[in-house]
Image (cartoon, helix red, strand yellow):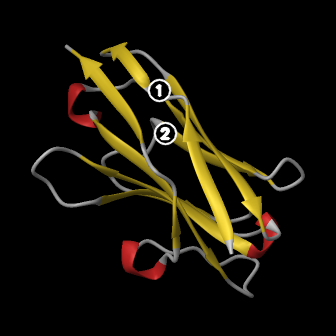
Amino acid sequence: QVQLVESGGGLVQAGGSLRLSCAASGRTFSAYAMGWFRQAPGKEREFVAAISRSGSSTYYADSVKGRFTISRDNAKNTGNLQMNSLKPEDTAVYYCAAVMTTGLSIYFISHRQYDYWGQGTQVTVSS
């Protein structure tokens, strides 16, 4: 199995940027597709972005498209989420997730499809 640890959250003003990182340990990170989800107080966990094992395929929620960029560095066993033009409605706990897959270009957008989760990192955007 793989262990995931997120970092990079914090408090930022609207219009600002943050870069979240997800450090993976355990099994070979390149065997896993990964995704980012977020959960605001009183709301369900929400899909943000996903990336395939190879990094060749990505997918974004409409709410973050054009502002967020998901990436990964398999050599360093890390995944990243660059968040620009942040809005107060982006405030949430952000989680990275991973699922083992044989498909190099497959990504997953449902939280039910992921087997491994980090502990989450808080992102707060002030207006």
- Front residue of 22/104: it is 22
In this rendering, does residue 55 appear at all?
no
Q: Position of residue 90 (x, y in %)?
A: 29, 35
Instruction: Tell me which label, 2 or 1, sits earlier in the chain.
Output: 2
- Front residue of 110/60: it is 110
SS for tag 1? Answer: loop
**Residue 91, quarter of the rendered image:** top left
- Residue appearing at x 36%, y 17% in the figure: 11
In 3D space, how far apart are the residues under numbered discs 2 and 1 (Cα atoms)? 6 Å
Which label is found at residue 68?
Answer: 2
Q: Position of residue 25 (x, y in %)?
A: 75, 58
Q: Does residue 64 appear to the left or right of 72 in the view shown?
A: left
Residues under numbered marks 2 and 1 in contact, where contact means CB atoms less than 8 Å apart = yes
On screen, residue 108 above or below 60? below
Quadrant in which the N terminus appears: bottom right
Q: Position of residue 55 (x, y in %)?
A: 73, 61
Of all residues, the one furthest to the right in this rendering is 75
Q: Does residue 41 appear to the left or right of 45 in the view shown?
A: left
In this rendering, does residue 90 appear at all?
yes
- Residue appearing at x 79%, y 53% in the figure: 77
Label 1: which residue?
84
Which amino acid, mark 1?
Answer: Asn
Quadrant in which the C terminus appears: top left
The local crowd at label 2, few if under 14, some if 14 to 19, many if 20 or more residues have their Cα within 10 Å, is many
- Front residue of 99/57: it is 99
